[in-house]
Image (tube, helix red, strand yellow):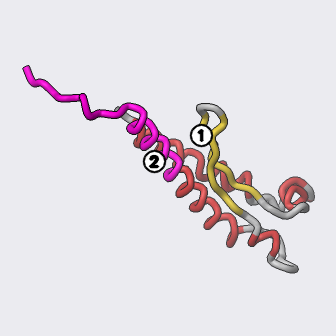
């Protein structure tokens, strides 16, 4: 039988490190989506404001980790939803990368 000294193990600190690692993974995934969305947006730029306002990140909603991709201009919603969604880039990008992000997440938390 092998004995392990756990007196110096801090469960709270370990949990915080895991949450930080998941947040870092989520931010990396979000930046990958931003890097795809900006050059692939199908609209014609007039000021480049809409394209440059595309951003991503993560936040926690209770125990749920949310990876975010958004447009920061007040008219970004129209680019996504108007004109039969011809200029949409945010949702198509999320749909494209979601399986890869989830697979990577599963690899992180796999025991």
Between the C-alphas of marks 2 and 1, the distance is 12 Å
| Residue 7 inside the magenta-drawn segment | yes
At x 87%, y 53%, the residue is 81
At x 40%, y 38%, the residue is 13
40 horizontally vs 81: left or right: left
- Determine the secondary structure under disc 2: helix
- Residue farthest toward the top in the current orientation of the protein: 1
82 horizontally vs 5: left or right: right
Q: Mark 2 points at which residue?
A: 21
At x 38%, y 35%, the residue is 110
Residue nearest the observer in this picture, 70 or 100: 70
Main secondary structure type of the part rendered in magenta = helix
Q: Name the residue under label 1.
A: 65
- Determine the secondary structure under disc 1: strand
Above or below for 27 versus 43: above
- Residue 106 at what x, y percent from top left? 45, 38
The residue segment tinted magenta is 1-25
């Amino acid at each position: 039988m092998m004995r392990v000294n756990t007196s110096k193990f801090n469960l709270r600190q370990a949990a915080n490190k895991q949450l930080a690692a998941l947040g870092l993974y989520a931010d990396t995934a979000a930046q990958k989506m931003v890097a795809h969305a900006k050059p692939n947006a199908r609209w014609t730029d007039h000021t480049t404001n809409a394209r440059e306002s595309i951003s991503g990140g993560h936040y926690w909603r209770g125990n749920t980790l949310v990876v975010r991709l958004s447009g920061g201009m007040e008219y970004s919603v129209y680019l996504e939803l108007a004109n039969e969604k011809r200029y949409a880039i945010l949702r198509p990008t999320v749909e494209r990368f979601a399986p890869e992000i989830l697979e990577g997440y599963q690899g992180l938390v796999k025991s």
